[in-house]
Image (cartoon, rainbow, N blue to C red):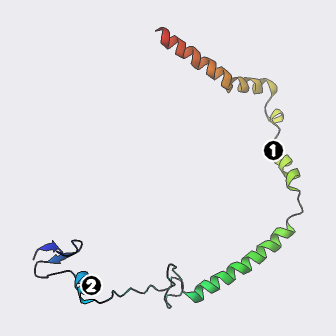
Amino acid sequence: MRLIKCPRCELNYITEEEGYCKVCKREMKGERQRDEIELCTVCNEAPALPGKDVCLFCLKEMNANNDRDDEQEVRVDESSLSIDPVSAMDEIIPEIDEDIPPREYDEIENDLSLEEMEEEEAEDEDEEDEE
């Protein structure tokens, strides 16, 4: 019993005894393919809507819950607006001069200077060209 490809569609495998695959036989008889009904992933009872994984009842219930959550969030957001967002940002940004002593800050700035890095790279390239 060897498997070969269906001579009609050349997609499905059949045994040598069979003439055509099941799909081709169904098409030749004019029968429509039965779509498998997917069940709702939430309740596992009702068929799911096309393109969705939940049934109509569960979808409505989920939307109702989301609307209630949105209303609660709006209430919370309205009560928390007592802080001025601009003044809060000033408090968050630390002062650099307070954290790092001026002498160390200058050293760090010199080490991280892009201009100096460009000059060093240019010197390195000149040295390589001379060699």
Is residue 50 left or right of 66 when viewed as pictured?
left
Give the spatial CA distance, label 2 vs label 1: 71 Å
On screen, residue 123 above or below 42? above
Q: Which numbered circle lies on residue 27?
A: 2
Q: Residue at x 83, y 49 (%)?
A: 89
**Amino acid type, mark 2:** Glu
Q: Residues within 10 Å of mark 1 (few under 14, many from 20)?
A: few
Image quadrant of residue 32? Answer: bottom left
Task: Sort mark 2 into few (<14), some (14-19) or many (20+) by Cα contacts within 10 Å.
Answer: few
Mark 1, secondary structure of its residue: loop
Which residue matches tag 1?
Answer: 93
Image marks 2 and 1: residues in contact by CB distance under 8 Å: no
Q: Residue furthest top?
A: 130
State which mark lies toward you, 2 or 1.
Answer: 2
Where does residue 56 sit, x and y in percent of width and height?
Answer: 57, 87
Toward the viewer: 30 or 131? 30
Q: Nearer the viewer, residue 81 or 13?
A: 13
User: Relative to the observer, which residue lies in front, 13 or 90?
Assistant: 13
Q: Does 87 appear above or below 64?
A: above
User: Where 71 falls versus 106 (above or below)?
Assistant: below
Asked if residue 93 lies left or right of residue 20, the reply is: right
The disc at residue 19 is none
x 23%, y 81%: residue: 24
Of residues 123 and 20, the one nearer the viewer is: 20
Q: Earlier in the sequence, mark 2 or mark 1?
A: 2
Q: Is residue 41 left or right of residue 62?
A: left
Q: Quadrant of the N terminus?
A: bottom left
Q: Quadrant of residue 111?
A: top right
Secondary structure at numbered mark 2: helix
- Amino acid, disc 1: Ile
Q: Name the residue: 88% across, 59% down.
A: 83
